[in-house]
């Protein structure tokens, strides 16, 4: 635990040298949800609201920005490249899975910086959008925490499993790309999943893990989930966390059996 | 001029030969581009499943705009992407002069040394989408409209190239450019949709400052709604002005450049 905390401190200090990059990158992260929100606000204005009210759209996309900040994971291709180049060899000598924990502290460290830097931007956007979550209760804020933590863990484990595919596959970047494409369609990141009714079968949406990274935490924050839906969602998150954790342990054990690299 | 055309053909042949050496990589990159292309088409279908009009554009018009976006984007990737992305590394490593000392125009060799041939299939799909949806619109396309659209697509590509060259030129003064490119590519993503989805200040900024309107929407508008000659000339003049500024920034930056070799 002490080793992990020390790694986290080191990562936090390391990221301080990328302040300018993080500021610009964080600003860029606001852009995509706001573009999609503008598109669907026009759609809503055109159809006289209906399924997509302007209030809901503003709440939804502000929540997308928040969930994106908390749940982001991206280390698949980077760790995959390190595995293929043998750079993880020094870490294999350590008594704990340093490769895994290094990625965890990298993720948390970068997020700590990004979220801190994003606060002024978030406050500005919140006021420009007319305070979309002003009616939110403390219960909604508290009920948002478990789903977003669950979504973050699932997102991280998916990236880690993608990275470990590098033991057998050369193009981890391509796999991440395909994963991201499916995620864009069925996770709720691009648009509310209600719009996919009739296009993508509902059982498929409910079964896959993508929805539980974005759509489920967003609906919990906005307060559109009944208690049974909320508990069901948490149950699905736990199930997917377990599946991806088992997959990670299996891939790691199998991958190491045949792994060789230059150096040690 | 003939010399430059011959040089371009050589570079094109060379780019094909190099990329086709790694066939799996070649196929994977084409599939990756195609997947992105289909995702965007799917998103447009989801939008038009809800409404007949998006900010005054119907489904076929929006698809023409998307086709124009794909064409300009893929032309940028095909012709300039690899070369412009390499400029910061050349500056950082002090190897820019090796490129600039070649007996051709500086901007030519900096911008057109290598082509990214994975973009070709998507470029073809972009053209097909434009032609198919123009046919469906059945509005009739005059020679003047078609000609002004082609001019504005070339102009849009020039503006996009000029902006990216300006960002790359910042490498003469700073090494942290990755974030600028990431942020700018997030803005250019808005070019898939008509710039009229934004209101007020955002629309002005996205039309003329981060000029997505000039790059993508106006060429599509020339095809589907038509533009007056004055409007077309104004947009062309704007493009030339941006290109002039980008060249000035690059040349100004060269004065701050120190070589590592000579």
Image (tube, coloured by chain):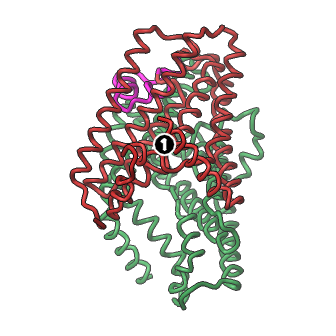
Chain colours: A green, B red
Q: Chain of mark 1?
A: A
Quarter of the image with the C terminus of chain A in it: bottom right
Picture quadrant where residue B28 is located: bottom right
Residue extending furthest toward the front: B2
Q: Is residue A22 visible?
A: no
* Residue at x-position 59% and y-position 37%: A191
Quarter of the image with the N terminus of chain A in it: bottom left
Image location of residue A161, percent across then percent down: 64, 67
Query: Start and end of the magenta stretch?
Result: B196-221
Lateral position of residue B80 relative to residue B259, left or right? right
Which residue is disc 1 drawn over? A63
* Looking at the image, residue A106 lies above or below residue B16: below
* Residue at x-position 67% and y-position 61%: B22
Lateral position of residue A145 relative to residue B162, left or right? right
Q: Nearer the viewer, residue B63 or B85?
A: B85
* Residue at x-position 55% and y-position 12%: B145
Q: State the predominant SS element of the stretch in magenta.
A: helix
Q: Is residue A194 visible?
A: yes
Q: How many marks?
A: 1
* Residue A109 is covered by the magenta coloring: no
Image location of residue A164, percent across then percent down: 64, 71
Picture quadrant where residue A189 is located: top right
* Residue B214 is covered by the magenta coloring: yes
């Amino acid at each position: 635990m002490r080793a992990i905390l020390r790694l986290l401190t080191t990562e936090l200090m390391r990221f301080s040298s990328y302040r300018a990059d993080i500021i610009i990158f964080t600003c860029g992260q606001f852009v995509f949800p706001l573009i999609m929100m503008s598109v669907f606000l026009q759609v809503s204005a055109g159809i006289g609201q209906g399924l997509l009210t302007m209030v809901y759209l503003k709440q939804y996309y502000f929540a997308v920005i928040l969930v994106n900040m908390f749940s982001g994971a991206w280390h698949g291709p980077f760790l995959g490249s390190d595995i293929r180049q043998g750079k993880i060899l020094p870490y294999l000598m350590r008594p704990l899975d340093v490769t895994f924990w290094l990625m965890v502290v990298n993720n948390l460290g970068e997020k700590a910086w990004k979220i801190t830097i994003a606060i002024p931007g978030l406050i500005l956007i919140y006021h420009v959008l007319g305070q979309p979550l002003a009616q939110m209760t403390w219960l909604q804020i508290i009920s948002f925490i478990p789903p977003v933590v669950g979504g973050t863990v699932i997102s991280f484990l998916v990236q880690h499993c993608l990275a470990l595919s590098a033991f057998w596959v050369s193009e981890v970047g391509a796999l991440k790309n395909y994963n991201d494409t499916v995620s864009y369609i069925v996770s709720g990141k691009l648009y509310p999943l209600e719009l996919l009714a009739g296009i993508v079968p509902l059982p498929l949406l409910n079964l896959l893990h993508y929805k539980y990274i974005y759509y489920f935490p967003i609906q919990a924050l906005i307060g559109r989930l009944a208690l049974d839906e909320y508990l069901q969602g948490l149950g699905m998150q736990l199930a997917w966390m377990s599946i991806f954790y088992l997959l990670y342990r299996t891939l790691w054990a199998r991958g190491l059996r045949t792994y060789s690299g230059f150096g040690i | 001029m003939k010399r430059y055309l011959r040089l371009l053909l050589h570079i094109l042949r060379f780019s094909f030969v190099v990329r086709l050496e790694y066939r799996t990589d070649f196929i994977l990159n084409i599939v990756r581009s195609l997947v992105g292309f289909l995702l965007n088409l799917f998103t447009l279908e989801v939008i038009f499943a809800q409404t007949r009009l998006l900010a005054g554009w119907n489904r076929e018009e929006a698809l023409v705009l998307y086709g124009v976006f794909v064409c300009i984007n893929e032309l940028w990737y095909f012709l300039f992407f690899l070369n412009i992305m390499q400029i910061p590394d050349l500056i950082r490593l002090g190897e820019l002069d090796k490129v600039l000392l070649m007996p051709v125009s500086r901007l030519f060799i900096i911008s057109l040394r290598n082509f990214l041939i994975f973009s070709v299939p998507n470029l073809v799909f972009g053209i097909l989408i434009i032609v198919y949806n123009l046919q469906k619109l059945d509005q009739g396309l005059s020679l003047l409209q078609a000609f002004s659209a082609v001019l504005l697509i070339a102009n849009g590509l020039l503006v996009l190239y000029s902006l990216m060259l300006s960002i790359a030129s910042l490498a003469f003064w700073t090494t942290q450019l990755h974030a600028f490119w990431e942020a700018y590519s997030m803005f250019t993503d808005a070019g898939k949709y008509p710039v009229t989805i934004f209101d007020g200040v955002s629309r002005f900024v996205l039309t003329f400052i981060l000029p997505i309107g000039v790059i993508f929407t106006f060429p599509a508008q020339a095809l589907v709604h038509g533009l007056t000659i004055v409007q077309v000339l104004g947009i062309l003049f704007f493009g030339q002005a941006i290109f002039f500024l980008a060249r000035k920034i690059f040349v100004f930056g060269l004065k701050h450049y120190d070589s590592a070799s000579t």
